[in-house]
Amino acid sequence: MKATINDVAKQAGVSIKTVSRVINNEISVRQLTREKVQKAVEELNYQPNLAARNLAGAKSFSVAYIYDNPNAYYIIDMQEGILSACKQQGFELLIHPCDAKNKNITEEVVNMVKHARIAGLILTPPLSEMPEFVKSLVALDVKVVRIMSGDVAPDDLSPCVMVNDRDAAQTITQHLIDLGHKDIGFIAGDAKHMSTVERYKGYRRALKESNIDFDKELVIEGEYSFDSGVSGAKQLMSAESNNTRPTAIFSCNDEIAAGALFAARLMNISIPEQLSIVGFENSPFSRQTWPKLTTADQPNSQIAEDAANLLISQVRKQKNQTTISQYVPKLIIRDSTAKC
């Protein structure tokens, strides 16, 4: 028979209200009492009925992850990180994919928040980088936490978890420069994502600080997709092109890099002997290619878990902060790069 909150209270020797406070992770419970309740919960395998709890009072125990991103690995990592925090803190997660370019996007998400009784929202790019959209959500008196590219929060609309793509991109470009590469191609991700802008700035800064002339012909506009990497690499490495043929390519993410590597193989270009390729994010794409990709490790699951914990603390009014420590993706050197 399924254990109830009454069973937990009886076994722990506390009131039902105290059990509820522990389950809701309220900070006013003494540590010894908290441990007794948690032990009883584990022994009885008690599972709170979150749906009933939401209906029982005005307080909501549901948060939503709102995203528009074609990268399946990124989405999965984000979901896993947010779910981990929700499970630990007794919250439910609603996942809402959408199209940021839809002219009715604000109305769509506002209606979802109202109808689903959402307590808070986690936004990822490009939605997190749309100030007017964020303002409309904050006006609903719902908590919002944004995951964004940059080193500092751009405004005080809501708390942010920042990812310092610029410094990471400079480091990975500098790795190529240290290997002797001067003609370094750049295949961009979606222009609407600030991560593309920040990674491009890091690439440019590394070239400048090493006194390497910037060649705009080596920069290819693209999207965060495998096909974009294929077409971008073909454009850069084509024998018919008048462009300077690069000895290395910076790809804005691992999916692009995997596409670039595939294109190089089709063109009988050896990696890394004739062309070095780097990616970004350390997604499974970086480990599924041959050779494995040099990349920047962006811990998306941990970023998402931190964002969820920050959001839940805001919902419970435990914290009042604008941002938390930024993440700087770390260089991982693998076999796709070599000396020029």
Image (cartoon, grey):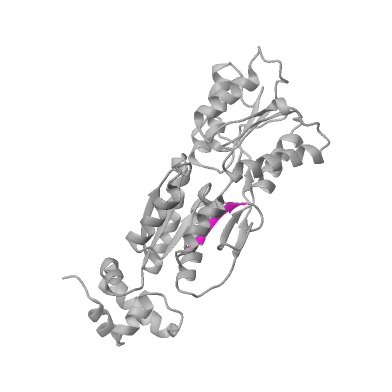
Q: Residue furthest right?
A: 211
User: Would residue 46 be seen by someone viewing this image from the given angle?
Assistant: no
**Whether residue 260 is visible:** yes
Quarter holding the C terminus is top right
Q: Is residue 148 magenta?
A: yes
On the image, which quarter does residue 61 sit in? bottom left
Q: Which residues are magenta?
A: 144-149
Q: Nearer the viewer, residue 331 or 106?
A: 106
Q: Position of residue 261 (x, y in %)?
A: 56, 26
Please give the name of the residue rendered at 29% of the width and 87% of the height, measured from the top-left corner. 13
Residue 212 pos. (x, y %):
81, 33
Quarter of the image where one finds residue 83: bottom left
* Residue 44 rendering spot, x and y as whole percentages: 25, 73
Q: Main secondary structure of the magenta part?
A: strand
Which residue is at 55% across, 28% downward?
229
Q: Is residue 47 left or right of residue 31?
A: left
Residue 64 drawn in magenta:
no
| Above or below, comparing residue 318 to residue 102 in the picture | below
State the residue in front, 143 or 46: 143
Q: Nearer the viewer, residue 280 or 116?
A: 116
